Amino acid sequence: MATVDNSPKILVIDDDDDLRYSLKRVLSGRNYSVLEADSGEAGLEMAQKHSPQVILLDNRMKGMSGMEALQHLRGINPNAMIILMTAYGTTQTTIEAMKFGAFDYIMKPFDLKKILSLTESALAASSDLTRANNSDESAPRISQEDIEGGIIGSSPAMQTVFKMIGQVAASDVTVMITGESGTGKELIARAIYQNSLRSQKPYIAVNCAAIPENLIESELFGHEKGSFTGATNQRIGKFELCDTGTIFLDEIGDMALSTQTKILRALQEGEIQRVGSSETIKVNVRMLAATNKPLEEMVKEKTFREDLYYRLNVMRVQLPPLRERMEDVASLIDFVLKRLARDSKADAKSISPEALALLSKYRWPGNVRELENLVYRSAVMAQGEMILIKDLPQEVVNAVGDVPVVTRAPFAADPQVDGSDEIEAVAQTAEPAAVPHVVSSLAADAEIGAPPSDPFDDVYQSLRQSKGTNILEHAEREIIKRALIETSGKQVKAAEILGMTRATLRKRIDQYDLGNAGK
């Protein structure tokens, strides 16, 4: 009975026979099933027939170029991770490779450790994508009604906010909306307006922090011609334009005391005066205000009028930060992705469970605004219709730290990787006979020895006798390996023990082929 080969399939497409041979020998030594094609056209046929998880694709070949093949391969198998290889790299080539959906781009000649690390990362990303596509966890979480409304949240904290909106919307009561920057205060103000009796009347939002102090009164109340330098015409202010409607004053805590006085009069008396005029104008305006500043403290410090504070704070809606309603993260991400797809701004339509699990542990200092920007950025970086961990910003991955992640290996041209560690470069002129030695060397490096227990001088003499030169490199490798074993592969904790940044540790892990240490 024939056995089924379940080993990962890797397709090498290159018109250089020696390079294909070298890559096949090295990759086969890692128990990968390696397929070969000597042209872009033959590679497309192989990809169609065998559905490889990873494709190593040369850029310059006779006939179809690698860039052309890349675009066709994305259509044949969207889940395949394609690594473009070239000896003639340019800025434009790199940009185009990523634009057309390459997993990564590597320059020839490249170090074997790097191509192996990059291939492993690509295989892991392909597995994530395949598993996520077959998972119910990537199913839609929100309705079309939610998309149109723009306010997402099923958490108890947000349900309380929604109840408050329903309670205050039908009246003309003044509402103060508070919360950290990025929590969605303007969305809440608009929701109050849309559900109010004034929903068919004008609605004007004013960001008080964005208008210079010497212009804010003119912006809000208008001015007469010649009232100040530059006032060449009469201007109608926002309050007058918004008569019978609703005005939303965002960041009201940034407003000068002189302007606060006039806002108080508009609230109490329902009247305003244009700058440069003594005429009183009656206005019927419902006011909504928002701030991320502690107005109570500002009142004590005399930087915000106490009487205005109490006039504004008749009803208060306090928005929770995103870190206090983490159960809403999945729905918010789904909402942003659907809106991006609707507006044709990105191809990604879902997020993998692994990436979602990571983001569900992030603290979100920028709240919902940060989440929107992050999802947009990640959707642009994604090479298919799903956001994977590798597409997330590295600073966010680093901030979470203790979540097992798959990230893209560094380019072979990374100048911070010491060339003395290179085993043997696989170039277009690689000698096939040299490959078995390289494979055995890699295997020897993977062995894990017992932790050293001798004093430092004995360790030094032992390394000096057994390794000859480059003993610092060997010592560093063993120390890093032991830190990873001690922390069960958790890089943030290992980096802390070693006294280095996580970014530096990741470079050393790639350099010394320690990707599996501690796992």
Image (spheres, rainbow, N blue to C red):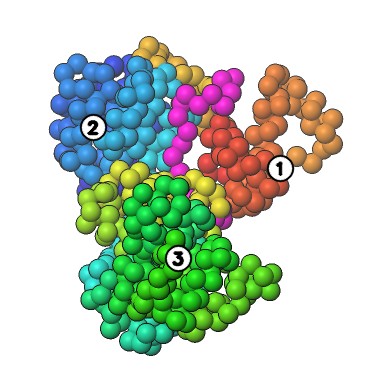
Graded by Cα atoms within 10 Å as few (under 14), some (14 to 19) or many (20 or more), the crowding at tag 2 reads: many
Is residue 146 shown to the viewer in this render? Answer: no
**What's the mark number on residue 70?**
2
Question: Which residue is more in the foreground, 273 or 168?
Answer: 273
Provide the residue span drawn in magenta.
400-420
Residue bearing mark 3: 250
Graded by Cα atoms within 10 Å as few (under 14), some (14 to 19) or many (20 or more), the crowding at tag 3 reads: many
Question: Which residue is more in the foreground, 493 or 334?
Answer: 334
Residue at (53% x, 59% y) in the render: 365
SS type, badge 1: loop
Would residue 418 be counted in the magenta stretch? yes
**What's the mark number on residue 279?**
none
Question: Which residue is more in the foreground, 47 or 222?
Answer: 222
First-in-chain label (1 vs 3): 3
Which is in the foreground here, disc 3 or disc 2? 3
Residue at (82% x, 38% y) in the render: 454
Q: Position of residue 245 (x, y in %)?
A: 31, 75
Is residue 121 shown to the viewer in this render? Answer: yes
Residue at (28% x, 51% y) in the render: 348
Residue bearing mark 1: 499
Q: Position of residue 26 (x, y in %)?
A: 41, 28
Question: What amino acid is found at the position of numbered circle 1 in the picture?
Answer: Gly
Q: Does 44 sit left or right of 382 as displayed?
A: left
